[in-house]
Amino acid sequence: MPPAPAPETLRAPLVVEFPFTRSLGPVQSAFLTGLRERTVLGVRTGGGRVLVPPVEYDPETAAELRELVEVGAAGTVTTWAWNPEPRPGQPLTTPFAWVLVRLDGADTALLHALDAPGPETVRTGMRVRIRWAAERAGAITDIACFEPYDGEAVTGTRDHDGAFDDPVTGIVAPARLDYTYSPGRAQTAYLRALADNRTVGERCPSCTKVYVPPRGACPTCGVATTEQVEVGPRGTVTTYCIVNIKARGLDIEVPYVYAHIALDGAGLALHGRIGGIPYDQVRMGLRVEPVWSEDGRYPDHYRPCGEPDADYDTYKELL
């Protein structure tokens, strides 16, 4: 008989996304507020160089920088790369060039998009100018993009006190990563077992440690792992922490406990939330069992199973 076909490796689209919130010091606040007002500010170093975008400390001497200057809205392309397939969230929806532009009066280059009809129209040394966004809020996106410009370069800068009405003091920058995740042979088997309310790992043929989740190879011995081992379902709390800050989008009341749990038969502990018990009663050695999610695809949390606490010597190597 021909061998049975290998199970298909799982693949799924995955999005990692979070808002990054930060406050601004006086230099960055002036720079972003200036963009809102269609003014580009740089900062002058002790050596006389003008840095755009500005920084608060000299990258060469680490000296604090506060001397703001206004530079031009036009500049020169120092290098570029063509982007034939813009991704969601990028400055332009049609093909464009990523460019480094040294604005008139600046000694460093600013990265942004150049709206150009094709790569044959872009070159190092070409003149470009800022195309301002119609609506501006104090962010780098207030520069909609750069566009070709036939004006001559202008030398010199003007001192600026950085004072604006209603200055921008903080920003929220959304971070997002879209990709297709393929867990590979070992973790595909692990995920398929979870769908049957089982937890499986793989045993290293050299050191015999059982890795959960399986990795396809032993990180200690460097050899492939193929022997599948079912572990649990019960396990032991080895270490834990009490969470007092509520995560955005997570419908769990604080405080709650997140723990390392060594499932019976596993060679290392995995992460899991502890429920069904007051947070201040969770302890090392507590014996627990999984409570599966409503769709049965993963343990929602672990709860005490009623067994006596495990002796420390039985899990001390798994801390």
Image (cartoon, grey):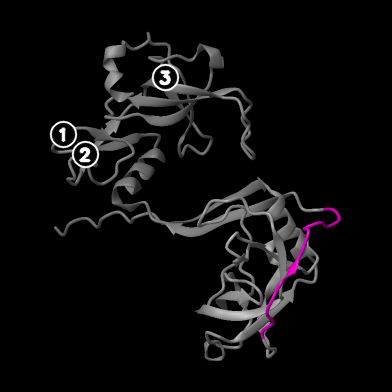
Q: Which residue is mark 3?
A: 288
User: Which type of secondary structure does the marked residue at label 1 adopt?
Assistant: loop
Q: Residue at x 32, y 53 (%)?
A: 184
**Number of the front mark, 1 or 2:** 2
**Residue 75's quadrant in the figure?**
bottom right
Residue 181 colored in magenta in the image:
no
Residue 160 colored in magenta in the image:
yes
Magenta residues span: 153-166
Q: Are marks 2 and 3 in contact (CB under 8 Å)?
A: no
Give how far across and how far down residue 88 sits, in percent. 60, 67
Give how far across and how far down residue 67 sits, in percent. 69, 58
Q: Residue at x 63, y 63 (%)?
A: 53
Q: Earlier in the sequence, mark 1 or mark 2?
A: 1
Q: Earlier in the sequence, mark 2 or mark 3?
A: 2
Q: Left or right: where does residue 287 sit relative to residue 219?
A: right
Q: Left or right: where does residue 67 sit relative to residue 309?
A: right
Q: Which residue is mark 2?
A: 220
Q: Which residue is mark 1?
A: 207
C-alpha gap between disc 2 and disc 3: 28 Å
Q: Are marks 1 and 2 in contact (CB under 8 Å)?
A: yes
In the image, residue 200 above or below residue 37: above
In which quadrant will I find the N terminus?
bottom left
